[in-house]
């Protein structure tokens, strides 16, 4: 069962009065109490796809088409006042760098109390116990002492836990985690991933996990959408993606994961992700694809259903979805 559906989402930017399309026909469903990974190289459109859900896009952007359905409402049709009710309370965001979300001038208590004040109108005294309980849930040690700390007094892992606590205080049903572990070392990374898994299982949270780290996806995620140049090029459950990837880009990403034993050559993907200014005819991956043939240079493939995968590639000639 899906809790959120993104349908035919198209958006782009106005730069020097010219419109540049960025996201093209993005479709994915976030299933209830699952972790849905959105993977791809930097610049593939992962973050913009998710920021569109909360309408947190730059002022020179425009969503030109699509629907984002949550609780039978199209979030894209809501005005700024209406969408604010969803931010934090229904759908929370965990950013890559928690320092950009925590205000360095306020204590942790003040910042967490602000979340409660917005949603529940509780007094500071009544809120204190609620906040301490929530900090315990996100594995903050000595939460009573931490309340008086400023963000600079906490480690990166602790700051990220505080942001996750904000999502819990707002009782968000969906968390969008945008590369939440990129700025952390490997052991803390594992702890944060375990914490997200615990929230999913114990608090019935559904998670969109944006990452370029396929190793994390294979360990923690249920569904995967692979993005390239503003398009989803493959979608399937995590087992199928890693067991039998279909799209050449997905295959190349998986072949570039290092192994612990180091006995396998790590493949690289030739070339770079195209920029917003590059106009590419045909399949956007054709300049880097080792399977490219003449049709690929002329026609952008439609979605095909191949086994349990949805794939955008001319190598598969099954029925259009
Ligand atoms: Fe490669 Fe052609 Fe498939 Fe694009 S459509 S991924 S160029 S084989």
Image (tube, grey):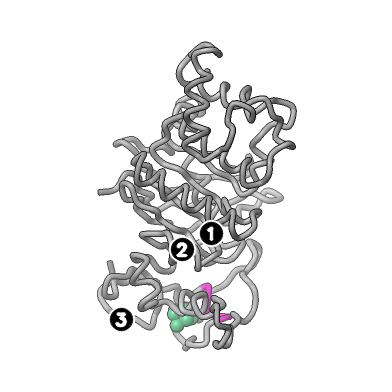
Q: Where residue 229 sits: x, y (%)? A: 55, 65
* Location of the C terminus (image quadrant): bottom left
Q: Which mark is residue 317?
A: 3
Q: Is mark 3 within 8 Å of ligand 1?
A: no
- Give the label, 3 or 1, closer to the camera: 1
In the picture shown, does residue 177 fall above or below 280? Answer: above
Label 2 secondary element: helix
Residue matched to label 1: 211
Q: Which mark is residue 65?
A: none
State which quadrant residue 307 falls in: bottom left
CA–CA distance in space, label 2 to label 1: 8 Å
* First to last magenta residue range: 284-288
In the picture shown, does residue 6 fall above or below 249? Answer: above
Q: Residues within 10 Å of mark 3 (few under 14, many from 20)?
A: few
Q: Where residue 214 sits: x, y (%)? A: 50, 67
Q: Where residue 101 sits: x, y (%)? A: 64, 37
Contact? badges 2 and 1 (CB < 8 Å)? yes
Residue 261 located within the stretch drawn in magenta? no
Rendered residue at 54%/65% (across/down): 213
Q: Is mark 2 within 8 Å of ligand 1?
A: no
Whether residue 296 can be seen here: no
Rendered residue at 58%/83% (across/down): 262
Rendered residue at 56%/88% (across/down): 263
Depth check: 121 or 303 in front? 121
Q: Is residue 235 left or right of residue 14?
A: left
The residue at the far front in this view is 142
- Give the label, 2 or 1, closer to the camera: 2
Disc 2 or 3, which lies upstream in sequence?
2
Label 3 secondary element: loop
Contact? badges 2 and 3 (CB < 8 Å)? no
Residue matched to label 2: 217
In the picture shown, does residue 269 fall above or below 197? Answer: below
């Amino acid at each position: 069962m899906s809790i959120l559906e993104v349908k035919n989402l198209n958006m782009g930017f106005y730069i020097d009065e010219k419109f540049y399309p960025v996201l093209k026909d993005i479709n994915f469903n976030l299933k209830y109490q699952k972790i849905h990974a959105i993977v791809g190289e930097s610049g593939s459109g992962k973050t913009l796809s998710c920021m569109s859900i909360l309408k947190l896009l730059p002022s020179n952007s425009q969503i030109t088409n699509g629907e984002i359905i949550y609780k039978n409402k199209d979030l894209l049709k809501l005005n700024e006042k209406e969408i604010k009710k969803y931010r934090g309370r229904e759908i929370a965001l965990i950013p890559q760098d928690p320092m950009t979300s925590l205000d360095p001038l306020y204590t942790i208590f003040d910042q967490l109390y602000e979340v409660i004040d917005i949603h529940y109108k509780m007094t500071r005294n009544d809120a204190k116990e609620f906040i301490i309980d929530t900090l315990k849930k996100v594995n903050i040690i000595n939460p009573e002492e931490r309340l008086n700390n400023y963000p600079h007094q906490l480690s990166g892992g602790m700051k990220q836990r505080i942001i996750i606590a904000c999502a819990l205080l707002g009782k968000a049903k969906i968390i969008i985690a945008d590369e939440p572990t990129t700025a952390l070392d490997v052991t803390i990374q594992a702890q944060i991933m375990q914490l997200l898994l615990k929230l999913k299982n114990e608090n019935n949270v559904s998670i969109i996990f944006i990452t370029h780290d396929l190793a994390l996806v294979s360990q923690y995620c249920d569904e995967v959408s692979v993005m390239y140049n503003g398009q989803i090029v493959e979608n399937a459950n995590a087992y199928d993606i890693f067991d039998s990837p279909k799209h050449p880009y997905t295959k190349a990403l998986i072949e570039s994961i290092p192994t612990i034993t180091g006995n396998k050559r790590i493949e690289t993907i030739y070339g770079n992700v195209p920029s917003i200014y590059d106009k590419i005819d045909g399949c956007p991956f054709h300049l880097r694809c080792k399977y490219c043939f003449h049709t690929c240079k002329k026609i952008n493939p439609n979605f095909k259903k191949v086994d349990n995968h949805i794939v955008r590639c001319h190598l598969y000639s099954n029925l259009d979805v």
